Each structure stands twice: as structure tokens, then as C-alpha cells.
Image (cartoon, rainbow, N blue to C red):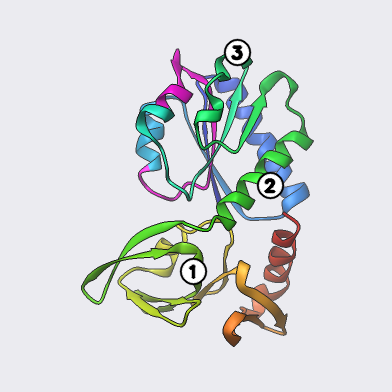
Amino acid sequence: MVNILICDDDKEFECILENKISKVFEKNLNIEHNIVCCDNLTSLEMMLKSDNVNIVFLDIMVNDKNSIDWMIERQLSNRLTQYIIITSFPVEGYRFSETESCYFLIKSKMNDEQLLNAIKKAISVASKKKEQQIIIKSNGKNCIINVQDIAYIESFNNSIVLHMINNDEYPVCSSLKLFAQKMPPNFLRCHKSFVINMNYIIGYKRYQFTLKNNYDVPISPRLYLKRINDYKNYLLI
């Protein structure tokens, strides 16, 4: 699932962009996605605190406030979130290079190909950054782990176990659904009890993915073809 947030005070353009993004995903990516919108930087800041946002489409000028200046002032550094800056006023993007934004789009010149390239780059960067550290509580201790070191996540009732690529295991009190929502786009829910890191897949066979270190993770029979296609589409990003 790719969670997308659009922040723009132009409601008409916001609606147009939302439709364009959905069409790009349906036609070219075939990846599950969710889009929410807001029209001010205060709401954006609140939504970002959820840690569930993978991509933000952010207008440079939101209610007469320069969002790039806002980003720099707040030193936004959530490595799980990628920013695509959009604008009708290119001259306002003079500080673009000072942010961690991954793409810059001019509204009047934006076409489907540019939008697709921007989304693919955002997903790629969000999925493959080396350091994406989060704090989890496991066995009564606060532990700092790198998200991209998680090979797969397994659920047991209302708790989960993070299986790391180095064979470490971290039990965490959380539902699989809630925890998976915080993961970058390279994490795929392939079974009601399993989420896998697609960066570690080395092969698959009927109803099963094989990961590095010879982990075998089941694929739901009902979703088998869909999940294989999800993985193939991810490889093309």
C-alpha cells in the first residue's frame, strides 16, 4: 500500500491531481494506494505525525505560505516520507535543493509521464534508503531498528514478530495491519499473517515467497496471482 497526501489550497487542482495520480497507479503501476488531501500546512503537519504517509505532493505556496521555507524551518527528516514539490510559480522554488524533496513538478507543464516518473522515483527512494530508523518497544525495552533490515513480519493474535535479515527477532505488541501501515512501499502483505520486504525476495513458487537466508513466507492462495503481479510491478519501479 502506498499512502499519498496532497497538500494544496487550490481545490480544483487538488481534484485534478488526485484523479491523475489514481489513473497513473491503475494504468502503469497496479499497486494498491490511498490518497488523502488537505489545504493547509497545519493539517499537513498533523497528518505527518501518524508516520503512515509515503508520498506528499506539496504545493510551494499554500495559503500564501512558502512550504519549502516551512519544510526547512521544521527540518523535516522522516525518511519514510518522500516529498514531490508542485507549483505554478517556479521562481518560488529557489530553495528546493535545500530540502529532501525527490522531485519538482510545474503544474502547467505536468503530464502523465512526468507524474509517473515522479511517483516511481518517490517509491524507489522510500523503498531502498539504507537508513530508515524507527523506535519499537520489544520485551520491555525501547529498541532502535532499521526498517529496511526487516525481512518479514509475522502476526500472532494481536501481537507481531519482526524477523530481521540477520536472524534477530523482535516481538512487538501491535496488530499486523496497524504496523504494516507505517512501512514503506516495498513491504507487501502477502498473507493475513505475513508482511514481507520485497527487497529480500530471491524467488517464489506456488503459494510461497522465498527470501534471503532461506526464509519461506506463505502467500494467500486467494491472492496468489495478485501478489505475484504486485511483486513484478515493484521490480519495474
In the image, the segment drawn in magenta is: 49-70
* Residue 73: quarter of image: top left
Relative height, residue 133 to residue 113 (above, below) = below
Dot 1 amino acid type? Asp
Q: Secondary structure at mark 1?
A: helix
- The magenta stretch spans residue 69: yes
Rendering coords of residue 39 (x, y %): 46, 25
Q: Secondary structure at mark 2?
A: helix
Relative height, residue 202 to residue 111 (above, below) = below
Marks 3 and 1 sit apart, C-alpha to C-alpha, by 40 Å
Marks 2 and 1 sit apart, C-alpha to C-alpha, by 22 Å
- Sequence-wise first label, 3 or 2: 3
From the image, tell me which residue sits under label 3.
Answer: 91
Task: Please state which of the two labelled residues, at mark 2 or mark 1, is closer to the viewer.
Answer: 1
Marks 3 and 2 sit apart, C-alpha to C-alpha, by 25 Å
Dot 3 amino acid type? Val
* Residue 49: quarter of image: top left
Q: Mark 3–mark 1 contact, CB under 8 Å?
A: no
Dot 2 amino acid type? Lys
Rendering coords of residue 65 (x, y %): 43, 16
- The magenta stretch spans residue 58: yes
Numbered label attached to residue 149: 1
Residue in the picture at 61% in, 72% down? 200
The answer to whether one can see residue 89 in this image is no
